[in-house]
Amino acid sequence: MSKIKLIFFIICLTWVLLLVIVPFTLPSDTVDFGEKGKVGTNDFQSQTGKMNPVAGFVYSTGDSFCHQKSSRSFFLNGNQVAYCSRCTGIFLGLAIGAGIAVFRYIDFKPEWIIIGLLPIGTDGTGQLFGLWESINLIRLITGTLAGVLTGLAVGVIIQELCASVSKHTETNIKNKNQGNN
């Protein structure tokens, strides 16, 4: 088991737990951002700035990286979760994929990219062009699939980097020892 993969998993799991716990650290029914949020902007600084520091941080990152539209988000404790259901699914999937990668050697298959990304791409594109309005459960499922794929891919990248560094280090030590003889 790679310590780096374990650290990646712990970070992903901690983030998912924060997304679930933070709405309970705020008074009930106090967070609802409505439908005006946009990706890449800080639409709700006036609200996130009044939250406790942990909640403020979590909701501020959501404000920067997610539209946070309430109709596309889950509510816990009567409060909107910091990210929409699709983004929440991606983070959940990252934690699942990273967890699998910690305990299993992953022989990554290229077709996994299609399996992981086709559903989220189809759902998001269809919704973008007005072909249908997706529901939060579908957004969560497609996001989770994409997140699992990404978590597994990062796990493979980490395992390959660690193997490469290990091989390089062993070669350097062997060469150094041969030079001392």
Image (cartoon, rainbow, N blue to C red):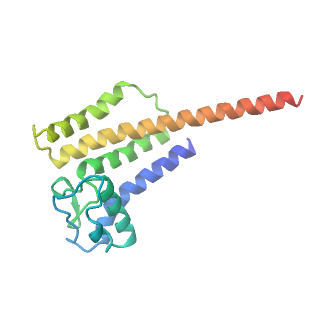
Instruction: Name, please, the residue furthest toward the front.
Output: 41
Residue appearing at x 19%, y 65% in the figure: 32
Give x and y (percent) for residue 131: 10, 37
Give x and y (percent) for residue 108: 43, 28
The quadrant of the image that shows the C terminus is top right
The quadrant of the image that shows the N terminus is top right
Which image quadrant for residue 28? bottom left
Task: Tally the numbered discs.
Answer: 0
Question: Is 168 placed above or below 22 here?
Answer: above
Give x and y (percent) for residue 96: 38, 44
Question: Is 19 placed above or below 96 here?
Answer: below
Residue appearing at x 59%, y 33% in the figure: 163
Instruction: Name, please, the residue furthest toward the right.
Output: 181
Residue appearing at x 29%, y 57% in the figure: 41
Which image quadrant for residue 43? bottom left
Question: Is 119 placed above or below 13 here?
Answer: above
Relative horizontal placement of residue 142, taking residue 97 as reference (left or right): left
Give x and y (percent) for residue 37: 21, 57
Relative horizontal placement of residue 169, taking residue 14 as reference (left or right): right
Instruction: Name the one closer to the observer, 47 or 29.
Output: 47
Question: Is 146 placed above or below 108 here?
Answer: below
